[in-house]
């Protein structure tokens, strides 16, 4: 089975380094997948999740707040501002943050940072998706 090396680092620490069979992410132009032997490219990545399949077939998920991804035929490197493993996310904390953001959106008012509030909601929804996928993978 063909594999590639995946490295995911945040501004604070190395999150993952290992051998995988595939990587899936969301770039500025949409979702994409990378398999061993992929053509080389560099892209910015949107807040969301990085999903990857380990050699044994298990899938893992990591929340990414945004950053850059470099793909080469033998490796993928993800440089993220913030990266958190899906199983390290706190569901209740995410739901509370999401609720607070939704309240701000409902009040709207004269908030000059309205776009930032929507971006925050997007990040919280991405964290929730990462948490839920990690839970699903854990149960299988």
Image (cartoon, rainbow, N blue to C red):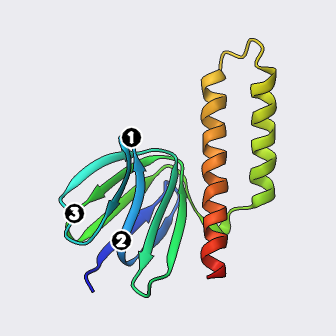
- 10 Å crowding of disc 1: few (<14), some (14-19), many (20+): few
- 10 Å crowding of disc 2: few (<14), some (14-19), many (20+): many
Residue 66 image point, x, y percent: 48, 46
Pointer 2 with pointer 3, Cβ within 8 A? no
Q: Which residue was labeled with disc 1?
A: 28
The residue most toward the top is 110
Q: Which residue was labeled with disc 3?
A: 72
Drawn side of residue 113 relative to residue 55, left or right: right
Check the picture and name the quadrant holding the C terminus: bottom right
Residue 5 image point, x, y percent: 31, 74
Q: Residue at x 25, y 82 (%)?
A: 2
Picture quadrant where residue 139 is located: bottom right
Q: Residue at x 63, y 31 (%)?
A: 118
Q: Secondary structure at mark 2?
A: strand
The correct choice, above or below, for 57 with respect to 119 in the image is: below
Q: Earlier in the sequence, mark 3 or mark 1?
A: 1
Drawn side of residue 44 relative to residue 118, left or right: left
Q: Residue at x 49, y 57 (%)?
A: 10
Picture quadrant where residue 134 is located: bottom right
């Amino acid at each position: 089975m063909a594999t590639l090396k995946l490295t995911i680092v945040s501004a604070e620490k190395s999150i993952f380094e290992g051998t995988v069979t595939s990587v899936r992410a969301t770039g500025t132009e949409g979702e994409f997948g990378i398999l061993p032997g992929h053509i080389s490219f560099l892209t910015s990545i949107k807040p969301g999740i990085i999903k990857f399949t380990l050699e044994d077939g298990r899938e893992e998920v990591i929340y990414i707040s945004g950053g850059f991804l470099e793909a080469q035929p033998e490796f993928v490197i993800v440089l993220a501002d913030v990266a958190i493993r899906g199983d390290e996310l706190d569901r209740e904390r995410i739901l509370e943050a999401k609720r607070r953001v939704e309240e701000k959106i409902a009040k709207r008012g004269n908030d000059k940072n309205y776009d930032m509030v929507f971006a925050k909601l997007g990040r919280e929804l991405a964290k929730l998706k990462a948490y839920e996928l990690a839970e699903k993978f854990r149960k299988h």
